Image (cartoon, rainbow, N blue to C red):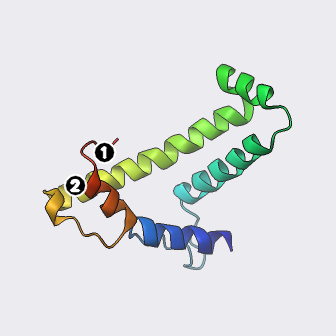
Amino acid sequence: MRIFSFDFICKFTFKIDTECFIPFFPEPKLADSFDLASKLSVQRVMSPLPFIQKLKRLLNIGSEKKLKEAIGVVDNVVMEMIGQRRREMPTTMDLNKSNLLSRFMGSIENDK
């Protein structure tokens, strides 16, 4: 079910096929990082002692370090996709508005 959700999100948001349903195809690193970041974010919110999470974030240790790394992987992949789309479509007027990423790209000046 997790793979189905991830595949659907990628198709709707980025208009890319993750090929997660090909038999024996290894899960992409993006899926693993996205899943880990989601799980760690929920754990952060559900933590009974928020000051421990803040201390971990300050010291960049434990789950906060893993969360930062996972978000970095997702960020790099998405920035690569944005760069590729920008190269394929030189003007923002040419952006296809059929997916969420293209809509965001058409409404902002700075990709970051």
Residue 78 is situated, as x and y percent measured from the top left of the image, at 41, 52
Taking the image as shown, residue 64 lies to the left or right of residue 52, namely left
Q: What residue type is labelled 1?
A: Asp
Taking the image as shown, residue 42 lies to the left or right of residue 95, namely right
Residue tagged by mark 1? 111
Q: What residue type is labelled 2?
A: Arg
Judged from the image, the secondary structure of the residue bearing numbered disc 2 is helix
Q: Residue furthest right?
A: 48
Q: Residue at x 61, y 75 (%)?
A: 4
Q: Which residue is drawn at 13% across and 57% down?
A: 91
Q: Nearer the viewer, residue 86 or 49?
A: 49
Q: Which of marks 2 and 1 is nearer the N terminus?
A: 2
Q: Residue at x 79, y 26 (%)?
A: 52
Residue tagged by mark 2? 86
Residue 102 is situated, as x and y percent measured from the top left of the image, at 31, 62
Q: In which quarter of the image is the C terminus?
A: top left
